[in-house]
Amino acid sequence: MRLGSAALLATAALIASPALPATQATPVRPRASAAPTSRGAASAVSPVVLTAPERAAARTITADLLRGHIRFLSSDLLGGRGPATPGDRLAQAYIATQMEAAGLEPGAPGGGWLQPFDIVGVTSHDPEVATVSKGQETVDLKYKDDYIAFSGVAEAEARLADAEIVFVGYGIVAPEYQWDDYKGADLKGKVLLMMNNDPSSDPKLFEGKTRLYYGRWDYKYDIAARQGAAGAIIIHTEPSAGYKWQVVTSSWSGENFSLPAEGARALTVQAWTTEEASRRIARLGGQDLDLLRAAAEKRDFRPVPLGVRLSLALRNDVQKKQTANVIGRLPGRDPALAGEAVLYTAHHDHLGTREATKPGEDVIYNGARDNASGVAAVLAIARAMKSMPAAPRRTVLFAAVAGEEQGLLGSGYLAAHPPVPIGRIAANINIDELGIWGRTRDMTMIGKGKSTLDTVVEAIAAAQGGRRIVADANSDKGYFYRSDQFNLARKGVPAAYLESGVDVIGKPAGWGAEQHKRYEETDYHQPSDELRADWDFSGAVEDTQLLFYLGVKVAEGRYMPSWNPGDEFEAARKTALAEAR
């Protein structure tokens, strides 16, 4: 649909005209939500004005500045920044120091730079072979080749004793789509074998190819626990997961962390299997995996007991530890709006180290692009924001959050314990991986079409010399639900999550997409994600400047952004706004 006149006025008020000096600022209370926008409304967006002070501040964001932050944060000295390690604490200290040097104030609730929180670390020792049986027949699953399992309980042992395996399709309960894969079946004590992602055969359901939260592994384990299951096994395929099997094994081996349990039901065992291993399990039960999956594409699907059983004992090392979010604050200049905030986030953690399999092997997950680069951008933006002649009208918060690789733990804690009420956070701008291949004509907005932030981002991109904002070409991978903005969005905060573009200036068509693909296949969540001399930071600078402008314009805007009508997070926003009032 096209924007009506009311929507145009709202958009213009949100992104237009340069800010007044503090002495001339007119206090204007934001309304509960701005007018809606749509995917097709880009042509109706009012031009954005990038003022001389804003452009001057943006020029402080340089390649050398970004590279320097990344060099330290991804150095071997920090040992991969695993949660609650010495490297994690070094990262926190460095970030806090840089925030202070930039001129920010401590921004954590209660004062200080750090927002510490407890995590529980569990290292599960899987047997080399897990056996699935049916009478005298068995299927042996080799650790890491066929399966990987990890404990869902913080206990010395997690044990499944002759537990029946039941195929439950996608394992989804979605009332708004009249979808229930469980149909009231008694699954207490069972092990649920389930497909990854969500149904995509009908474009009218679950937004077709676009992955929703229902397709995420954390949703699937959670809903399985609520069914009373003892365990859950997710079937991995590269198309359904969006990454290779090696990403599963590297992400889930070693120590895994969670927030302390607060009475919620938990699975005893959480696991993944390869597609071929899942075929063998189904075949042992007299079933064809492809036929089972085809049946699961329909609403009338019911759980299918496979008549096979799994016994598995995981020996666990359990430790209670502590990590921390790092939060800085730039107070807003407008007394009427300073109680509201724009929140930048980027995660400072990575995967730590792994055990060597041969002499001289690189065992450190340096995480240079993922996500030392995102933290570098946040620090650069903080410095740029502080360099402006006057602070924006709203307060700006800068949070380097912990434990993202462990299931968005730091942002989850931040969303539950925010520095300002959730209903007063105007927007969350999350940064996870900068581009390293040069300037691009485009930039990808993950979750494009969800909120009124679209029009602001599009207008700023246009002001950067005619750049364009494109929707995620891989929406089936569910990236919106895989990074820290998701936890803020669940609480109702409109979120902007942008990735580097693929239309690289000076390169042939398709070159940029190929670089992204190659990184995913060879460096993502691997020790090879290191700072390299051939990284081209020119695009990273331009993208970081766009994100800086976005924060300024939202912080200066007359109205707070909103989710578009009917969006999955709209109801949470209305609740948060009501509570804030």
Image (cartoon, rainbow, N blue to C red):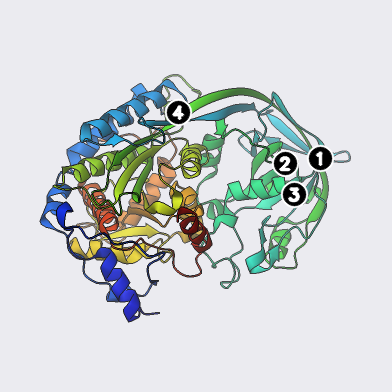
Q: Is residue 389 left or right of residue 151?
A: left
Whole-percent x, y for residue 311 in the image: 79, 34
* Label 4 with label 1: CB-CB less than 8 Å: no
Disc on the earlier residue, 4 or 1: 1
**For the residue marked with disc 1, what is the amino acid?**
Ala
Q: Is residue 457 left or right of residue 267?
A: left
Q: Measuring 47% from the left and 70% from the top, which residue is drawn there?
A: 565
Q: CA distance from mark 2 to mark 4?
A: 27 Å
Mark 4 vs mark 3: give the one in front: 3
Q: CA distance from mark 1 to mark 3?
A: 15 Å
Q: Measuring 78% from the left and 50% from the top, which residue is drawn there?
A: 166
- For mark 1, what is the residue? 163
Residue 231: numbered disc: 2
- For mark 4, what is the residue? 352
Disc on the earlier residue, 4 or 3: 3
Q: Secondary structure at mark 2?
A: strand
Residue 233: numbered disc: none
**For the residue marked with disc 2, what is the amino acid?**
Gly
Residue 367 sits above or below residue 88 on the image? below
Mark 1 vs mark 3: give the one in front: 3
**For the residue marked with disc 3, what is the amino acid?**
Gln
Nearer to the camera, 417 or 381: 417
- For mark 3, what is the residue? 227
Whole-percent x, y for residue 362 in the image: 41, 26
